[in-house]
């Protein structure tokens, strides 16, 4: 259990007021020496982030990552940037296309100062089982690399999310560090439905469903819930708002599984730091194509060694003026996830905010 559960966890915050993004990040690193000095000479430090969809522009930029890479290399550590393959269609479904996409977006060794790798192999089949004991899951499926990782820094661009409402560090670890099989298991309680009145049978969802769960029925698209893996691809692709989550009494299971995965992953990693970037916050996550308008003003960067505290502190500050993540009260599972994450000992909901 995280020792912070018993008392307030520290969360450092650097505002973007009168600072560039790079200066803001340097302020964070310069004021949290105790966090980063734990990454010693020779340590292989995994920097987890997502490069986002090809057309997305909100992702954390390589220039920012390089500041951290240089900091770690000065300590003699061996940083590397990594991500895992996703379950929906697109360039991040296999490591070859994923790495080419990352290079196109500037995540090259010369711009980062270190390699960018995909943790779960070319086709996302590197998936080891680790036993856990939670309410919803008794085992997690994660890449071999994650099973032996000892040093981790999680860089999360905060956004909204069409399924989880709010996307930050817990999602970046729980979903983002799972293998494709692990991701599928987490999504399996989410079964979208199609509103026939809105469906134009454009075919987009039928073509993009990775599990071939959608077919035509009486002139409309239809999802077979027995085949659907809950990846959300069809929701993202439908331009007619005809696909939505079928909220039911298990609607919180998705959020709980994600927290359980995050706990199962982090419990074996000795040194970890979480950094949340609260700028360019959009309604949809970086996996979605296009350049969404921002849904709130840029505020700054948060960091902590407590994953729950850093997510809660970022959420509280971002929603101080308006409820920007619930989509008019429709999505509340992020609130449930905070409570559940605390219950399973993932971290602390009580935090001490230190403004620097
Ligand atoms: S993408 Fe939307 S409109 Fe097109 S077939 Fe699917 S549900 Fe119907
Ligand atoms: S029907 Fe299910 S498996 Fe297919 S795209 Fe939609 S959510 Fe994913």
Image: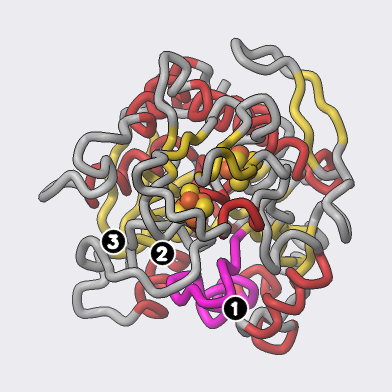
Residue at (78% x, 44% y) in the render:
146
Q: Distance between the Cα atoms at labels 3 and 1?
A: 21 Å
Residue at (27% x, 35% y) in the render:
330
Identify the element where label 1 is drawn.
helix
User: On screen, 9 above or below 336?
Assistant: below
How packed is label 2: few (under 14 Cα within 10 Å), some, or many (20 or more)? many
Q: Label 2: which residue?
A: 28
Q: Residue 58 location, x and y as percent?
A: 43, 71
Identify the element where label 2 is drawn.
helix
| Outermost residue toward the front in this view | 218
Q: Label 3: which residue?
A: 356
| Outermost residue toward the bottom in this view | 110
Q: Is residue 33 left or right of residue 38?
A: left
Q: Residue 302 location, x and y as percent?
A: 37, 55
Q: Distance between the Cα atoms at labels 2 and 1?
A: 14 Å
Mark 3 or mark 1, earlier in chain? 1
Q: Quadrant of residue 258?
A: top right
Residue 194 badge: none
Mark 2 or mark 1, earlier in chain? 2
User: On screen, 178 above or below 15?
Assistant: above
Q: Residue 296 location, x and y as percent?
A: 21, 62
Q: Label 1: which residue?
A: 66
Query: Looking at the image, do the residues carrying marks 2 and 3 touch, with CB atoms under 8 Å apart?
Result: yes
Which region shows up in magenta?
Answer: 49-70
Residue at (59% x, 62% y) in the render:
50
- Asked whether 177 or 195 is in front, the reply is 195
Magenta span contains residue 62: yes
- Is label 2 or label 1 in front? 1
Residue at (67% x, 17% y) in the render:
137
Mark 2 or mark 3, earlier in chain? 2
Question: The N terminus is located in which quarter?
Answer: top right
Magenta span contains residue 25: no
């Amino acid at each position: 259990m995280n020792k912070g559960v018993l008392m307030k966890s520290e969360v450092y915050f650097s505002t973007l007021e009168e600072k560039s993004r790079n200066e803001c990040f340097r302020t964070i690193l310069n004021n949290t020496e105790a966090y980063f000095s734990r990454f010693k000479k020779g340590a292989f430090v995994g920097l987890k982030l997502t490069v986002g969809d090809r057309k997305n522009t909100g992702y954390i930029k390589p220039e920012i990552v390089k500041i951290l890479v240089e900091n770690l290399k000065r300590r003699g550590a061996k940083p590397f940037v990594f991500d895992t393959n996703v379950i929906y269609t697109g360039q991040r479904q296999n490591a070859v296309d994923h790495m080419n996409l990352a290079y196109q977006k500037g995540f090259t060794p010369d711009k980062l100062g270190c390699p960018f790798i995909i943790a779960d192999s070319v086709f996302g089949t590197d998936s080891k089982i680790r036993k856990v004991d939670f309410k919803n899951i008794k085992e997690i499926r994660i890449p071999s690399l994650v099973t032996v990782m000892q040093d981790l820094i999680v860089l999360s661009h905060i956004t909204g999310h069409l399924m989880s409402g709010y996307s930050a560090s817990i999602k970046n670890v729980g979903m983002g560090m799972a293998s494709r099989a692990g991701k599928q298991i987490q999504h399996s309680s989410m079964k979208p439905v199609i509103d026939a009145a809105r469906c134009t049978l454009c075919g987009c969802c039928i073509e993009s469903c990775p599990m071939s769960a959608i077919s035509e029925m009486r002139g409309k698209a239809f999802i077979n819930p027995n085949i659907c893996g809950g990846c959300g691809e069809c929701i993202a692709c439908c331009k007619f708002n005809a696909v939505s989550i079928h909220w039911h009494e298990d609607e919180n299971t998705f959020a709980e599984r994600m927290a359980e995965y995050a706990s199962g992953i982090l419990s074996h990693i000795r040194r970890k730091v979480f950094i949340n970037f609260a700028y360019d916050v959009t309604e949809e996550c970086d996996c979605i194509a296009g350049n969404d308008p921002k849904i709130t003003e840029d505020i700054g960067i948060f960091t902590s060694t407590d994953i729950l505290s850093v997510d809660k502190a970022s959420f509280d500050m971002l929603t101080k003026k308006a409820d920007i993540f619930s989509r008019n009260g429709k999505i509340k599972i992020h609130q449930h996830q905070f409570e559940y994450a605390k219950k399973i000992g993932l971290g602390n909901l009580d935090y001490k905010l230190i403004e620097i």
